[in-house]
Amino acid sequence: MTNPTTDTLTPPVVPLHGATEALHVGDHDAPFVDIGDGTLIQLLMVDLAQNIWITRNRMQPGTRVIKHYHTGPVYAFTLQGEWYYEEYPETVNRAGSFLFEPAGSVHTLTIPEDQDGETIVWFLLHGTNINIDERGDVVSIADAFNVLAGYRLLCEAQGVSADAVIVQGEQN
């Protein structure tokens, strides 16, 4: 393709060399690990350069995730069960629901206590997760780097491998 203003060849949008093949993580390739609050997390992909991570979470009835917000947008797709944000109880996410969460939205993810079975949700998170207490003070953060490190440690402690996780931007 020729650039009409310079009459030179325009490089293709897709690089001719490098990581151009699709990468795949099968259903059981990356393990679910217990993070200790009624949640099992399967880390599917981390992009360290862009601070993005993708998980599939399995949460038990009655699970309540600490109040938090994200510095970037979050996308969620519910595969099974129900969940809602304590701050918006009228909006219930059920199997087949998609949720877009803008950066800065403060919320407390909650699984109904009376639900039969676990809730399974796929999340794509951009940016940093800021966990806060009831006064709004920061108590902890999660980003692509410490999510990957924590997942690897949990896998090791639980005797499973984290090798199936797609990791971009990691320096060897």
Image (cartoon, rainbow, N blue to C red):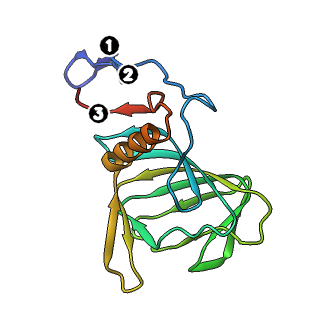
Amino acid type, callout 3? Gly
Residue 56 is tagged as none
Give the SS element for disc 1.
Answer: loop
Q: Split into 4 quadrants, where in the image is the N terminus?
A: top left
Cα separation, mark 3 vs mark 1, equals 17 Å
> Which numbered disc, 1 or 2, marks the residue closer to the eye?
1
Amino acid type, callout 2? Val
Would you say 78 lies left or right of 151 here? right
Residue 169 is tagged as 3
Q: Please provide percent x and percent y for residue 138.
A: 31, 74
Residue 14 is tagged as 2
Residue 17 is tagged as 1
Q: Earlier in the sequence, mark 3 or mark 2?
A: 2
Q: Please provide percent x and percent y for residue 131.
A: 38, 69
The residue at the point 33 percent across, 47 percent down is: 51
Q: Earlier in the sequence, mark 3 or mark 1?
A: 1
| Dot 1 and dot 2 residues touching (CB under 8 Å) | no
Give the SS element for disc 3.
Answer: loop
The residue at the point 45 percent across, 18 percent down is: 21
Amino acid type, callout 1? His
Judge by depth and name the residue closer to the eye, 99 or 120.
120
Judge by depth and name the residue closer to the eye, 106 or 64.
64
